[in-house]
Image (cartoon, helix red, strand yellow):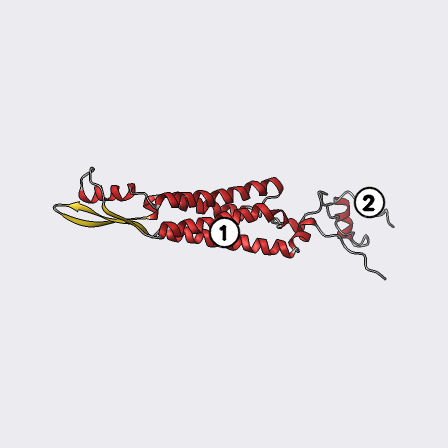
């Protein structure tokens, strides 16, 4: 006898696709790694210099969060979008994937612009010297802004993967859903009509316990 194949929900069939699993794993890896790199590298020193104080000079420095808070904020948005992409479907998934990609692009742009920014270090020089007109001297930038930009580009790639392959990814709880049909309410199992407690339960449910007698 040939077994009749049992149809599976669409989400389950998509989840079983090797291509869908691979693209999902790649997107998760890129997004998580990119956000981690951005969050860690924005805490590093981005710019260094000196400020003139009482005839001498003192070193001043600014980390990425002082130069610009945009990459950190967008990395957090990207992480939220990476999680949310599994909770939505169709148009919603497309929009969330787009937000993920835009978060990476915006963070990368902000990091590139921050790599040559001197405003944060000038403000630090003014604070240290006590002279609001003081500007930093010997300004140098480290490689950390570019590391931040590289992490942001990984978030962008995760968003592009979600835009391209997201339709083959499963959604949260998708395997428990049927194709648009509401689930029928489970009917309580019929009790033994000869038992008084089952008789009263049947009457409470509005059933006639004698109809099958």
Q: Residue furthest top?
A: 133
Please name whichever residue, 94 or 190, is drawn nearer the observer in this view of the structure.
Answer: 94
Residue shown at 53% from the left, 47% from the top: 159
Residue shown at 50% from the left, 53% from the top: 30
Q: Position of residue 54 (x, y in %)?
A: 12, 45
Q: Which image quadrant: the N terminus?
A: bottom right
Q: Nearer the viewer, mark 2 or mark 1?
A: 1
Q: In screen coordinates, is 123 left or right of 10?
A: left
Q: Residue furthest right?
A: 213
Q: Position of residue 8 (x, y in %)?
A: 72, 52
Which residue in the structure is indicated by mark 1? 31
Please name whichever residue, 196 or 152, is drawn nearer the observer in this view of the structure.
Answer: 152
Q: Position of residue 27 (x, y in %)?
A: 54, 52
Circle 2 — which element?
loop
Residue shown at 69% from the left, 53% from the top: 13
Please name whichever residue, 133 or 69, is drawn nearer the observer in this view of the structure.
Answer: 133
Q: Residue furthest bottom?
A: 1
Q: Measure the C-alpha gap from mark 2 to mark 1.
A: 60 Å
Q: In screen coordinates, is 118 left or right of 133?
A: right
Residue shown at 18% from the left, 43% from the top: 129
Crowding around mark 1 (Cα neighbors within 10 Å: few <14, some 14 to 19, many 20+) is: many
Circle 1 — which element?
helix
User: Which mark identifies residue 208?
Assistant: 2
In the picture shown, does residue 151 fall above or below 181?
below
Whichever of labels 2 and 1 marks the residue nearer the N terminus, that label is: 1
Crowding around mark 2 (Cα neighbors within 10 Å: few <14, some 14 to 19, many 20+) is: few
User: Which mark identifies residue 51?
Assistant: none
């Amino acid at each position: 006898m040939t077994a009749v194949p049992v149809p599976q929900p669409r989400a389950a069939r998509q989840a079983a696709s090797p291509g869908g699993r691979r693209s999902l794993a790649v997107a998760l890896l890129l997004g998580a790694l990119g956000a981690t790199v951005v969050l860690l590298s924005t805490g590093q020193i981005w710019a260094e210099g000196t400020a003139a104080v009482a005839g001498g000079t003192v070193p001043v420095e600014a980390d990425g969060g002082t130069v610009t808070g945009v990459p950190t904020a967008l990395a957090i948005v990207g992480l939220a979008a990476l999680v949310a992409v599994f909770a939505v479907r169709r148009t919603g998934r497309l929009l969330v994937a787009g937000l993920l990609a835009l978060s990476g692009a915006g963070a990368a742009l902000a990091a590139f612009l921050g790599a040559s920014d001197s405003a944060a270090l000038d403000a630090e020089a003014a604070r240290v010297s006590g002279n609001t007109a003081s500007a930093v001297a010997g300004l140098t930038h480290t490689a950390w802004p570019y590391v931040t930009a590289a992490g942001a580009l990984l978030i962008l790639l995760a968003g592009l993967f979600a835009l391209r392959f997201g339709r083959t990814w499963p959604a949260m709880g998708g395997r428990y859903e049927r194709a648009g049909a509401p689930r029928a309410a489970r009917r309580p199992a019929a009790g033994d009509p000869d038992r008084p407690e089952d008789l009263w339960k049947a009457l409470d449910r509005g059933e006639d316990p004698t109809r099958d007698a």
